[in-house]
């Protein structure tokens, strides 16, 4: 798997985390325990820091970047769907960022909130805990998510990462 230091910026990946061989991790990136980074995801911490908490999944094709001023921080048990783009934002514990969505500078997605597939959460936007952000630009529906709504999905990715770590093998064709 391509994991790169950039000068003195060296990724820190917990030994129980899973980074797929086709994902790319560069620079100031921290990946917490039992978290997973899936094929073709790119976490590029060249200008600043990217932090993934525990049991967080960054799914296929997603891009996480940062700026020199604002880090990109994902809490514990966060799910980032396929082909999402997160840059210089904060995603709090147990939130879900849907496939193809974009969350940009200084935006905050609250605990157990949802950013719907394809949604755009622009600069400085706040998605409150347990709310949904849907559309382009995202409109907020408060108190739309039940606590614990994502637990089964998060658990499935924690177990999937264990399976991939133990069983994935490249076949010669």
Image: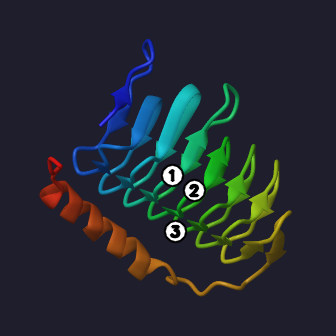
> Mark 2–mark 1 contact, CB under 8 Å?
yes
| Image quadrant where residue 35 sits | bottom left
Task: Residue 131: give x, y in percent of width and height.
Answer: 71, 76
Most distant residue in the top direction: 7
Question: Disc 1 or disc 3, which is closer to the eye?
Answer: 1
User: Between marks 2 and 1, how big is the CA–CA gap?
Assistant: 4 Å
Which residue is tagged 2? 83
Left or right: residue 169 versus residue 102 is left
Which residue is tagged 3? 94
Q: Which residue is drawn at 39% across and 43% down?
A: 23
Q: Which residue is drawn at 61% across and 67% down?
A: 98
Location of residue 159 with respect to 44 vertically, above or below: below
Relative depth, front residue between 51 and 59: 59
Task: Describe the element under mark 3 as helix, strand or loop.
Answer: loop
Number of numbered discs on residues: 3
Relative depth, front residue between 6 and 21: 21
Task: Describe the element under mark 2 as helix, strand or loop.
Answer: loop
Task: Describe the element under mark 1 as helix, strand or loop.
Answer: loop
Relative depth, front residue between 22 and 161: 22
Q: Which residue is drawn at 67% across and 25% down?
A: 68
Which residue is tagged 1? 61
Task: Residue 39: give x, y in percent of width and height.
Answer: 39, 51
Q: How crowded is mark 2: few (under 14 residues within 10 Å), some or many (20 or more)?
A: many
> Mark 2–mark 3 contact, CB under 8 Å?
no
């Amino acid at each position: 798997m391509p994991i790169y230091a950039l000068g003195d910026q060296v990724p820190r990946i917990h030994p129980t985390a899973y980074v797929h061989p086709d994902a790319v991790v560069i620079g100031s990136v921290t990946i917490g325990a039992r978290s997973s980074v899936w094929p073709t995801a790119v976490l590029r911490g060249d200008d600043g820091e990217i932090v993934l908490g525990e049991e967080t999944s960054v799914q296929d094709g997603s891009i996480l970047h940062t700026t020199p001023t604002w880090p990109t921080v994902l809490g514990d048990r966060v799910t980032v769907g396929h082909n999402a783009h997160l840059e210089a934002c904060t995603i709090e514990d147990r939130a879900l960022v849907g496939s193809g969505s974009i969350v940009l500078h200084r935006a905050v997605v609250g605990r157990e909130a949802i950013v719907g597939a394809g949604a755009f959460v622009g600069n400085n936007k706040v998605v409150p805990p347990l709310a949904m952000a849907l559309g382009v630009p995202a409109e907020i529906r408060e108190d739309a998510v039940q606590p614990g709504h994502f637990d089964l999905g998060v658990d499935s990715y924690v177990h999937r990462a264990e399976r991939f770590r133990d069983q994935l093998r490249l076949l010669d064709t």
